[in-house]
Amino acid sequence: MLDTLRTEWEQLDKQHTMEDLYARQRRYFGRFDKLLDQATAGPTWLRNPAIANVAAEALHYYDDYGYFLVCYCIMPNHVHLVVTLPDAAPPLLRTLQSIKSYSASKSNALLGRAGQFWQRESYDHIIRDAGEMERIISYVLENPVKARLTDDWQLWPYTYWHEL
């Protein structure tokens, strides 16, 4: 299934309108995220509280410098993050690379392992309006409920929300 999704992603072309591409990207991401939520194999290091705390610490470290942290949800095998960027912020890609580098190094040390910890790519998306911001914040916060990890997102220890 993952190979099929990657092939579909690679087939997104420029012959469609931006709205068509955006809709296709949303469908792709939704299906990919569902696979992540149902993952029963592969690394689930973030299920370990010490590792999830490393990720949370790294996300908070860049708050007010690299971005303004709106919300996040740390799942057993992936992280959802919503930020706003101040005018003087460094490129988000660079900030995410720093977060991944720091948290991977520290997490690998805690796990007694070496090697790649995070996937190289990230799915990022520009939020276009207030309504979309509300939907995405709700999606992020409700992710552990949808994945049946908890009955209430506020009980999931690895969610954060700074009300705007």
Image: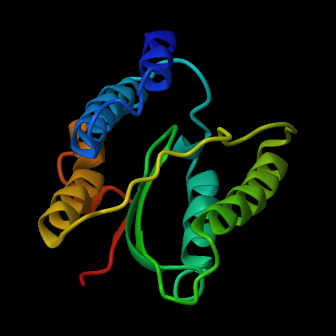
Identify which residue, 12 or 129, lies in the foreground: 12
The C terminus: image quadrant: bottom left
Q: Hey, which quadrant is residue 88 in on the image?
A: bottom right
Q: Is residue 107 left or right of residue 63?
A: right
Tally the marks. 0
Whether 41 is drawn above or below 151: the answer is above
Q: Hey, which quadrant is residue 140 in on the image?
A: bottom left
Q: Is residue 148 visible?
A: no
Identify which residue, 138 or 121, lies in the foreground: 121
In x, y percent, where is residue 86? 48, 86
Identify which residue, 48 or 91, lies in the foreground: 91
Residue at the image position 26 percent from the left and 31 percent from the top: 27
How is the rendered protein coloured? rainbow
Residue at the image position 56 percent from the left and 55 percent from the top: 52
Q: Is residue 9 left or right of residue 88?
A: left
Whether 105 is drawn above or below 128: the answer is above
The N terminus: image quadrant: top left
Residue at the image position 62 percent from the left and 71 percent from the top: 91
In x, y percent, where is residue 158? 42, 59
Q: Is residue 122 visible?
A: yes
Residue at the image position 78 percent from the left and 37 percent from the top: 116
Residue lying at the far front in this picture: please name it.
Answer: 15
Q: Is residue 146 left or right of residue 88?
A: left
Whether 65 is drawn above or below 28: the answer is below
Whether 18 is drawn above or below 160: the answer is above
Q: Hey, which quadrant is residue 22 in on the image?
A: top left
